[in-house]
Image (cartoon, grey):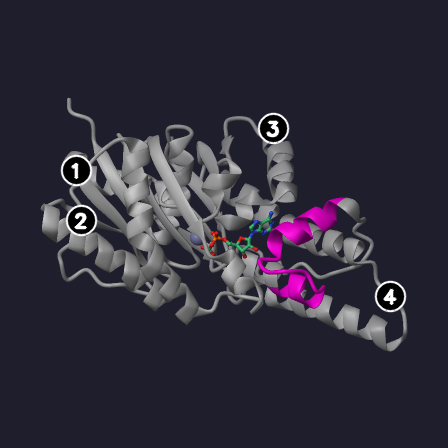
């Protein structure tokens, strides 16, 4: 049987990325051009700036992915591209590049949901076993996704306000840490002690939903009150306390859902999956739970990349999914 070679393209936020994947699991190349340095001085992603950078980078990044993988367009069986969710102007660059190549070279096109990509980053390490549960934690998403088979996603819980990564970035900003703040809080948290009492939003007893805006506000209020009283709070202890609160809720709900739905695997996905505290805690807890395997991708596959989009696209392609040339960027696409 001939190998399946898929080109993946991802431009939903602030990374311009292209990758070539063989048979859904083997990375031949994985190129990521990060724009973080351009957005840093604004304290967050500036959508217009992101679109312009994508336009400048997209052909270079795709070219590099082909060269690195030692393939040409002739070898590509399908083009997988992130169609949403994300920043509309950013998504449009990837979608249009994918459509142009698809049309010019007569290669099938497959639109991919960004979160499906994050989940499939795990398949680049190990084969999936169903049913599985994925904890998706990124800058824009916090979701528990149940999968009973390839390409089928059921959201059993999601954030009602801020995403976990968003909370990290906002709290980081109040602590005067650079954007993106997640890695900085993570680092500080390991140097501090969780001495500050912060809330945990458990919500209703049977709910797998999340809420992080109350926690974020509690951090801001605590810092503000201390400042007014002329007291100082050690940012390390604040980072440790905040991180502990986030992780407590994420891990407790993940374990509860994993048991309730009798899953074989739990997959950690998304940019916040790079968090050392979260990885360590999940590993520790799941080591004591029989019959559930925990998968955690390496750091470079947790944050946005195109290998994960090609991995999800490969499965969708094999299941028969083809996108038309009417494929459009959809900033609020449902999984
Ligand atoms: O998945 P991603 O690269 O982009 C989105 O799809 O949103 O996730 C980016 C998010 C940012 O909010 C960033 O602060 C967070 O992931 N992040 C982390 C860590 N590394 C990245 N959050 C906590 N700890 C980390 N080590
Ligand atoms: Zn992402």
Which quarter of the image is occupied by the C terminus? bottom left
Q: Quadrant of residue 315?
A: top left
Q: Please say if the residues under marks 1 and 2 sit with CB atoms less than 8 Å apart.
A: no
Disc 2 crowd rating (10 Å Cα; few below 14, some 14-19, many 20+) is: many
Per the model, the C-alpha gap separating discs 4 and 1 is 59 Å
- Magenta span has 180? yes
Which quarter of the image is occupied by the N terminus? top left
Mark 3 highlights which residue?
287
Mark 1 highlights which residue?
77
Per the model, the C-alpha gap separating discs 3 and 4 is 39 Å
Residue 243 x/y as whole percent: 68, 52
Per the model, the C-alpha gap separating discs 1 and 2 is 9 Å
Q: In the rendered structure, find residue 109 and report the number of the disc placed on it.
A: 2
Residue drawn at x 11%, y 46% is: 105
- Magenta span has 82? no
Q: Secondary structure at mark 1?
A: loop
Q: Name the chief secondary structure element in magenta.
A: helix
Residue drawn at x 58%, y 58% is: 180
Disc 4 crowd rating (10 Å Cα; few below 14, some 14-19, many 20+) is: few
Residues 127 and 13: in front is: 13
Q: Is residue 132 visible?
A: yes
Q: Secondary structure at mark 2?
A: strand
The residue segment tinted magenta is 170-190
Q: In the rendered structure, find residue 292 and report the number of the disc placed on it.
A: none
Residue drawn at x 44%, y 31% is: 264
Q: Secondary structure at mark 4?
A: loop
Disc 3 crowd rating (10 Å Cα; few below 14, some 14-19, many 20+) is: few
Residue 268 x/y as whole percent: 50, 41
**Is 14 rendered above or below residue 1?**
below
Residue drawn at x 62%, y 50% is: 183
Mark 4 highlights which residue?
232
Q: Secondary structure at mark 3?
A: helix
């Amino acid at each position: 049987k001939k190998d399946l070679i898929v080109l993946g393209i991802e431009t939903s936020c602030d990374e311009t990325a292209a990758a070539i994947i063989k048979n859904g699991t083997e990375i031949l190349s994985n190129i990521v051009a990060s724009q973080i340095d351009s957005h840093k001085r604004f304290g967050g992603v500036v959508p217009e700036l992101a679109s312009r950078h994508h336009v400048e980078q997209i052909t270079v990044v795709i070219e590099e992915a082909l060269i690195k993988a030692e393939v040409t367009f002739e070898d590509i069986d399908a083009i997988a591209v992130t169609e949403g969710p994300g920043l509309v102007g950013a998504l449009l660059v990837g979608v249009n590049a994918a459509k142009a190549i698809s049309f010019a070279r007569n290669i099938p096109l497959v639109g991919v949901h960004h979160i499906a990509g994050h989940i499939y980053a795990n398949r680049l390490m190990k084969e999936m076993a169903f049913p599985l549960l994925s904890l998706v934690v990124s800058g824009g998403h916090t979701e528990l996704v149940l999968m009973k088979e390839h390409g089928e996603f059921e959201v059993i819980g999601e954030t009602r306000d801020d995403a976990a990564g968003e909370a990290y970035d906002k709290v980081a900003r109040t602590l005067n840490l650079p954007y993106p703040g997640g890695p900085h809080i993570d680092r500080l948290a390991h140097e501090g002690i969780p001495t500050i009492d912060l809330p945990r939003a458990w919500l209703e007893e049977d709910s797998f939903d999340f809420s992080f805006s109350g926690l974020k506000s509690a951090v801001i209020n605590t810092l503000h009150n201390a400042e007014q009283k002329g007291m100082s709070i050690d940012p390390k202890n604040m980072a440790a306390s905040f991180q502990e609160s986030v992780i407590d809720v994420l891990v407790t709900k993940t374990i509860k859902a994993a048991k309730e739905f009798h899953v074989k695997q739990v997959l950690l996905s998304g940019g916040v999956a790079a968090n050392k505290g979260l990885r360590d805690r999940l590993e520790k807890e799941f080591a004591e739970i029989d019959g559930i395997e925990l998968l955690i991708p390496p750091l470079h596959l947790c944050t946005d990349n195109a290998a994960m989009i090609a991995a999800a696209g490969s499965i969708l392609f094999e299941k028969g999914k083809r996108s038309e040339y009417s494929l459009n960027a959809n900033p609020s696409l449902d999984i």
